[in-house]
C-alpha cells in the first residue's frame, strides 16, 4: 500500500485533554505529528482547518443501525408496547437486504454528525458489516440473541453468533470487530448468558447487552430470579471488564458497587430513555463512583436520529434537572463520555478517543464560523451546548477521508437514501 500523508493545517484542536492550536500530520491510518512547524510540503494533501474545530471522532457505544428504517414508525409509546406490538412484529419480516439498506443509511447519518466508531447490535450482521465496510467507519458489531428459555432457539442464536465471529471479526483491515450480543437478562435464559460468558472468554471478544432499562424489566428479573438484574448477572459469573451494558437506568447502590468492582462499562442513552419514559440514569453518581459511562443514541426508532453531538447536550441537561444542580455533568465530562470513555468501553483506548501522536486518525472538523457559534469564546461549551451534527464539515476514519467540505466521499448519499426509502416502504407494507 502506498503511503499517504494528509495535513490538517492550522486547526483549533479540542479533546478530553484540553485545547490548543496546531497542525496535524497523518500518515496512512495514524497521527504522526502535532505541531506548528508542519508545512504543506510534508503532505500529499492539505486540509485548511482555519476557522475549524478539530475533535476526535465520536464514539457511539449503543445503537442499532438498521433501525433507521423504522424511524417514525412507532412513536409516543411505552417500551413494552413499542417492542411487543410494533418493533418485534416488524422485525419478523427483516432480511439481509433490508438490514444492509438501513445500516448504510445509519452510517451516512453518523458520518454527517461526526461519529466514526459505533457499537451495533442487531440481526443479519454480516450484511450490516458490509455497509460499515463500504462507508469506512469503525465498529464493534454483535448479533442480538434472544431465546426466551427455548433450547432450540438458544442453539440457533449461538450458532449465528459464532458464524458472525468467523466471517466478520477483523474485517475492513481490522476496523470491524465482533462482540457477543445477548439482548437482556429478561429475554435470555441463564444457559444462554452462561454460554455467552464462556464464548467471550474463548474468543477474547466483548459482550454487548441491555440491562435495567425500565422499572418493569427490573421487576420481571426480580420475579423470575429473586434478584435485581446486575446482582443476578454477577452471581452467574457473567460480568467483567469486557461487558458493555446499555441503559442501566434502574440501579440499586449494591448494583453500582458491583459495576465498579467488576469494571463493567455502561452506555448512557438519554434521548431514548426520555422518549420511551424509561427513566433517568444516575450518570453523575456513577461517574463519581469511578464507573466508566459512555454515550449512545440507541436506534433511530427511539431517538429518532443518530446525532451524538446533540446527545451530549441532552445528557448534560438531563443530569442537571435530575439532580437539580446546574453544575452536574458539565460540558467537559460529557465530551469525555462521547470520546475517551467510549474508546475505553470498547477496548480501544490505545487507538481512538483523543488526538495524540500514534493514535488512529479518526478525526472530525467542525465549522465554527456559524451564527449560533458566535462569539467563539468557549470551545467546549459551544460544542456541547450550541453545536449540532449539522456543523460537522469533514470526517476522517482510519486516515481515510469519509466526508470533506460536507461532501461524502465513500458512498453516494442520494443512492443510499433511495435504497433505504424503498426498503422501509416495502418492509412496513408487510407489517
Image: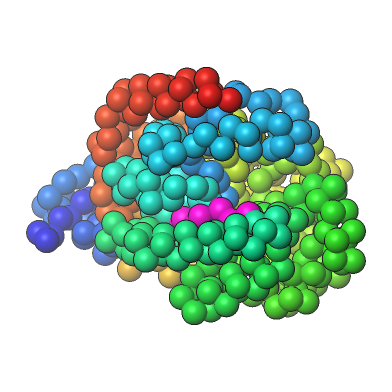
- Residue at image position (85%, 66%) is 225
Q: Which colour scheme is used?
A: rainbow
Residue 69 % position (x, y): 50, 30
Residue 351 % position (x, y): 40, 66
Residue 131 % position (x, y): 35, 43
- Residue at image position (58%, 25%) is 431
- Residue at image position (43%, 34%) is 98
**Does 88 sit left or right of 224 as displayed?**
left
Residue 52 makes an appearance in the image? no
Residue 69 makes an appearance in the image? yes
Observer-nearest residue: 160 or 359? 160
Q: Quadrant of residue 360?
A: bottom left
**Does 47 sit left or right of 66 as displayed?**
left
Residue 159 % position (x, y): 48, 63
Compared to residue 303, the image places residue 176 above or below, namely below
Q: In which quarter of the image is the N terminus?
A: bottom left
Q: Is the magenta stretch mostly helix, strand or loop?
A: strand
Compared to residue 172, the image places residue 199 above or below, namely below
Q: Which residue in the rendered view is the most extreme toward the front?
A: 152
- Residue at image position (40%, 46%) is 128
- The residue stretch that appears in magenta: 140-146
**Does 261 sit left or right of 67 as displayed?**
right
Amino acid at each position: 500500500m502506498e503511503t499517504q500523508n494528509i495535513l490538517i493545517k492550522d486547526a483549533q484542536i479540542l479533546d478530553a485533554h484540553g485545547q490548543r492550536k496546531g497542525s496535524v500530520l497523518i500518515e496512512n491510518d495514524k497521527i504522526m505529528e502535532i505541531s506548528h512547524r508542519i508545512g504543506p510540503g510534508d503532505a500529499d494533501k492539505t486540509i485548511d482547518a482555519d476557522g475549524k474545530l478539530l475533535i476526535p471522532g465520536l464514539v457511539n457505544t449503543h445503537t442499532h443501525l438498521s433501525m433507521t428504517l423504522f424511524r417514525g414508525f412507532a412513536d409516543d409509546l411505552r417500551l413494552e408496547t413499542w417492542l411487543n406490538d410494533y418493533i418485534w412484529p416488524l422485525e419478523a419480516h427483516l432480511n439481509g437486504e433490508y438490514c444492509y439498506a438501513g445500516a448504510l443509511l445509519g452510517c451516512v447519518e453518523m458520518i454527517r454528525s461526526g461519529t466514526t466508531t459505533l457499537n451495533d447490535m442487531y440481526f443479519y450482521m454480516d450484511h450490516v458489516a458490509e455497509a460499515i465496510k463500504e462507508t469506512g467507519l469503525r465498529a464493534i458489531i454483535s448479533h442480538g440473541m434472544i431465546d426466551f428459555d427455548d433450547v432450540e432457539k438458544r442453539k440457533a442464536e449461538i450458532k449465528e453468533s459464532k458464524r458472525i465471529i468467523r466471517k466478520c471479526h477483523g474485517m475492513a483491515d481490522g476496523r470491524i470487530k465482533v462482540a457477543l450480543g445477548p439482548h437482556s437478562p429478561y429475554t435470555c435464559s441463564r444457559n444462554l448468558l452462561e454460554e455467552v460468558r464462556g464464548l467471550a472468554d474463548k474468543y477474547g471478544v466483548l459482550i454487548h447487552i441491555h440491562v435495567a432499562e425500565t422499572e418493569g424489566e427490573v421487576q420481571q428479573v426480580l420475579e423470575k430470579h429473586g434478584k435485581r438484574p446486575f446482582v443476578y448477572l454477577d452471581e452467574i459469573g457473567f460480568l467483567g471488564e469486557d461487558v458493555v451494558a446499555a441503559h442501566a437506568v434502574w440501579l440499586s447502590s449494591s448494583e453500582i458497587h458491583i459495576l465498579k468492582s467488576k469494571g463493567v462499562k455502561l452506555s448512557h442513552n438519554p434521548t431514548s430513555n426520555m422518549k420511551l419514559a424509561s427513566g433517568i440514569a444516575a450518570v453523575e453518581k456513577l461517574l463519581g463512583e469511578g464507573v466508566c459511562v459512555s454515550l449512545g443514541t440507541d436506534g433511530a426508532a427511539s431517538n429518532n436520529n443518530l446525532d451524538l453531538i446533540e446527545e451530549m447536550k441532552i445528557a448534560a441537561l438531563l443530569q442537571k434537572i435530575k439532580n437539580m444542580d446546574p453544575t452536574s455533568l458539565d460540558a467537559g465530562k460529557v465530551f469525555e463520555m462521547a470520546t475517551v470513555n467510549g474508546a475505553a468501553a470498547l477496548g480501544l483506548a490505545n487507538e481512538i478517543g483523543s488526538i495524540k501522536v500514534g493514535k488512529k486518525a479518526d478525526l472530525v472538523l467542525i465549522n465554527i464560523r456559524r451564527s449560533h457559534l458566535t462569539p467563539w469564546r468557549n470551545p467546549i461549551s459551544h460544542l456541547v451546548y450550541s453545536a449540532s451534527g449539522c456543523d460537522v464539515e469533514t470526517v476522517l476514519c482510519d486516515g481515510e477521508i469519509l466526508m470533506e467540505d460536507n461532501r461524502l466521499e465513500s458512498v453516494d448519499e442520494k443512492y443510499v437514501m433511495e435504497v433505504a426509502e424503498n426498503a422501509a416502504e416495502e418492509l412496513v407494507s408487510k407489517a
